[in-house]
Image (tube, rainbow, N blue to C red):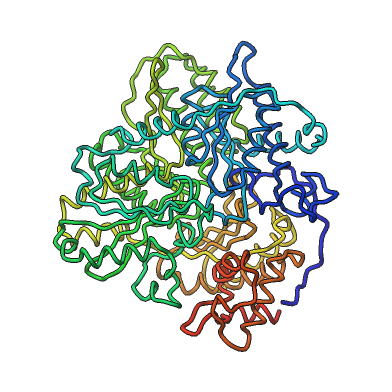
Amino acid sequence: MKSKTTPIQKTVPDRLQGTDGIRREIKVAKDSECRGLTPLQTFLEKSWITEEFMELYVYYYVKNQLKKKPALSKNRTFVIGWDPRDSSGIFTDAVVRGVRKAGGEALVLGVVPTPLVPLFMLNEDAAGGIMVTASHNPKDQNGIKLFLPFHGMKPLPADDVDLTQTLLKQNFGAVKKISLAGKKTNCRQKALQLFSKFSLIPENSWIDSPDTLKALILVVDPAFGALREIAAQVFQEAGVGKVIEVNAGKNGAVNLRSGVADLEGCPRITAEMISKPTGIFHSHKAIVKLFEIGRANKKSAESGKKRIAGAIFDADGDRFFCLKYDPFQDTLWVLSGDETAILQARHLVSRSPDKYRGSLYINTVESDLNASTSAKSMGLTPLLTAVGDKWILLKVHLALLEQKLLSKKLSSPKKRELKNKIAQLKKIGVRKVGTLQSLEASIPKSQTTTKVNSEVLAVGSEETGHNITTALLTRSNKADMAIYSGNGLKSALNTFSATEYLATTLSPKRFMAGVRQPFLPGFKSTLYAYYICQERFYKDSQVWRKVKQLLFQTTKQFGYTAKTRNFPDDPDMLYISLSNGKAGVFVRNSGTENKISVNLRGRKSDSAKLNKIGLEILKLLLSQLKDRDNLFYKMELYVLSQIASRPIIDEELEIKNQYRSRLINEMRKQNLIQLSSEGNRMTSLGKWYINH
């Protein structure tokens, strides 16, 4: 590709964090490529994360948290968990060390799913929680997710800025010399027992009887990650008829030919897609196993005696996709966060209509527009947010504060003042968790006059598989508390409870039709550009303005009326609403990977127009944002040069083995190459790309 851009000096951002903490490709500090660089310089200039950076990051997070704790509080504990990608322990040891050097006591859980960290933190009244993971990203990346003791929320942007500004002033050399001060306690078994109990109580699992899931044959795919053995054990204890676990080795190869990431954007998997050697899923063991089991149990499935499904997670266990085997078509239906959320919402509303009348159905801009339309038809209140489960959690807690206000006996001026504060925060956004904390503290704890029986939240959902429903944490000698967090295992239990209940009310064919398509889908497509200079795309930047101008031009040519819609939670996202919200296009930097996306949403009838609009925007982004210094960008061009004259299979491409799987996968996601019966071919976009 002939780049039209010139290299730019990387500037120091206000915040180092993305959508959910920090995440980068890993390097050990002693690597020759890091020589002469501080941990911060390596992070900022090379976009690598070292164990020294993790130690520094956690050290100052703990220091900041301990400053906030009430002076009389003696609880200096911090909960630490991780997924299994760091088989060496270099990075996780550094995190534990950072906590202890800062004077925190480390409650170490080891390899556990992300939702267990805030759960155990709240159970123990700890001062904070730390999860070492890069979630659905490949093994060559790692990162840190942080949790705050205020209802287990994740830091908001101003909290991130505070930590970033503290970090930028520090010297790792000084931290390196500090002795360990805090204790370290292994809490793994206690935490796992809590997680199992929490997952299985009927209030959280929605399982009414030991027989609810007995007709289910379930393939569990933990993506070689944190739910290995844990999820399968819970499903067995929940009464699932038969549980088969795959992709559960201990080699740390998280998300490799496994998990939810490979399923994104694929609503249906046919038999041809698992055929060797060119079927795109022929190496995905969970998918192959589901076809094998489905075919072996075809008659039982057609008669309704058995149902075959897959529970597919990501490496840290906070995302879940459901796969349903269709015996009538020999097909797997992929249910993303949208489909599972609607199934869960319908189950709640049908079982407790009064309790959920008017409750919130919260989803993000990535969702199918028809999902919220379906929720509204059930009597729920749809609410759209920016991308990230922390924004769903924020909306939930604002709504809980409103409900709390209604139940209190307050003077009219006081109630009006607090209502106005909440309304203003909804309008301008909340940038700091402390703002919510102060607002909650200003509402008197006593003087309750009215018990509110309705639920604030039905379902919070991200299309990528983060689903949030109200959960109950029962604590010995302490008051029970409601918990809200993205929890892949809870979402799976709830989805299977909902679908198995549905199976008792419908014929097998009607059941399959209702489950595979729980709402009439609209058009949904996402186009990607990887290996970019993300810092060039922000509100009113040169590239941002060019994209906006082109969007208004192209949408007008296709007969749409266009209007910019602002999301205070994500001001740098460019969101264009078309024809009064009937369709939309938005462009945003990923907060978890080095990529940018063009997201197309609308009616089925909009698909041809939106695809053409999206392609023009993607071409502009490819020409403006590609990072010529990025190693993967250089390898991408080399791969394209190899297949320019003939198709080549994966194994014959000249790529180092350590990069092969990731590079090929991301080039396919960009639609630069596609798999054919002869091997990888260049697409028309790939040909355009290499010539521009």
Q: Residue at x 37, y 63 (%)?
A: 287
- Which image quarter is the N terminus in? bottom right
Instruction: Identify whether 589 is placed above or below 666.
Output: above
Instruction: Identify whether 230 is placed above or below 189.
Output: below
The residue positioned farthest toward the bottom in the image shown: 645
375 or 458: which is nearer to us? 458
x, y percent for residue 145? 58, 40
x, y percent for residue 289? 34, 63
Q: Residue at x 54, y 79 (%)?
A: 649
x, y percent for residue 641? 67, 81
Q: Residue at x 53, y 47 (%)?
A: 84
152 or 463: which is nearer to us? 152
Q: Residue at x 56, y 66 (%)?
A: 661
176 or 432: which is nearer to us? 176
Answer with the quarter of the image where residue 155 lies.
Answer: top right
Count the numbered circles shown: 0
Quick check: can you spot residue 556?
A: no
70 left or right of 206 in image = right
- Which image quarter is the C terminus in? bottom right
Instruction: Identify whether 237 is placed above or below 334.
Output: above
